[in-house]
Amino acid sequence: MKGFIILALIVSVICPVVHMVDVFVYGTLKKDQPNYFRMNNTANGQADFLARARTVEPYPLVIATKYNIPFLLNMPGTGQRVYGEIYRVDQKMLEFLDKFEGCPERYQRTEVQLEVQDGDGEGENTLKPGSIVEAFVYSKNTYEPEWLQTPTYESYDAYGDHGLTYVIPEDRSPE
């Protein structure tokens, strides 16, 4: 028994278990969007695309500030069902995303229920279309009151026909 414990300890040090969590992105971190490169940068950690999905409940997705940033307001039951992407990320990427999103000062990381639209791949990372899953999402609990008077969107595209061009904030300029 003592030998097994020592072997398990050696294996856990050499091959540590990587804790992965699911994160739902709905804005500039999605594929083909201005900050997607951050999801692919292994220096930030690991992020594996799982599926496209949409929120089970409606939420207000607004574009606001002088930078035209997409914000998901933490007001379930208001707005539209929001489309985005689910990624399975390691602890390093989760810590990077927390810092990038200014969590918990600017955004809060909360759980949201999602309906899977389509997946990418096979095996353990495949999510079945139509299934309901939970993932973390970065949303706003505090916001400017006028944001509630702006249009809401079901999907964000920095290059969309809304005419609100995304501007990279000074504190988020590419490295």
Image (tube, rainbow, N blue to C red):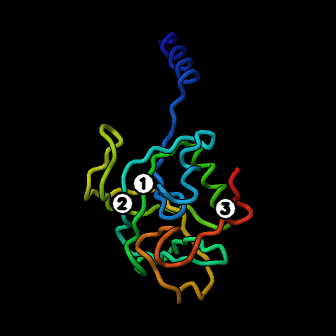
Residue highlighted by disc 2: 53
Q: In the image, 119: left or right of 68?
A: left
Please determine whether, in this image, residue 132 is positioned above or below residue 10: below
Classify residue 114 by image quadrant. bottom left
The residue located at (50%, 19%) in the rendering is: 8
Label 3 neighbour load within 10 Å: few <14, some 14-19, many 20+: some
Residue 102 marker: 3
| Amino acid found under the numbered disc labelled 3 | Gly
Label 1 neighbour load within 10 Å: few <14, some 14-19, many 20+: many
Q: Nearer the viewer, residue 60 or 68?
A: 68
Q: Secondary structure at mark 3?
A: loop
The x, y position of residue 41, in whole percent, is 59, 43
Please determine whether, in this image, residue 111 is positioned above or below residue 96: below
Q: Secondary structure at mark 1?
A: strand
**Marks 1 & 2, CB-CB < 8 Å contact:** yes
Q: Nearer the viewer, residue 42 or 78?
A: 42
User: What is the spatial separation of the Cα atoms under label 3 and label 1, in whole angstroms?
Assistant: 20 Å
The residue lying furthest to the right in this view is 170
Classify residue 112 by image quadrant. bottom left
User: What is the spatial separation of the Cα atoms under label 2 and label 3, in whole angstroms?
Assistant: 24 Å
- Label 2 or label 3, whichever comes before in sequence order: 2
| Amino acid found under the numbered disc labelled 1 | Ile
User: What is the spatial separation of the Cα atoms under label 1 and label 2, in whole angstroms?
Assistant: 7 Å
Classify residue 14 by image quadrant. top right
Residue 119 marker: none
Residue highlighted by disc 1: 86
| Amino acid found under the numbered disc labelled 2 | Ala
The residue located at (52%, 75%) in the rendering is: 73
- Label 1 or label 2, whichever comes before in sequence order: 2
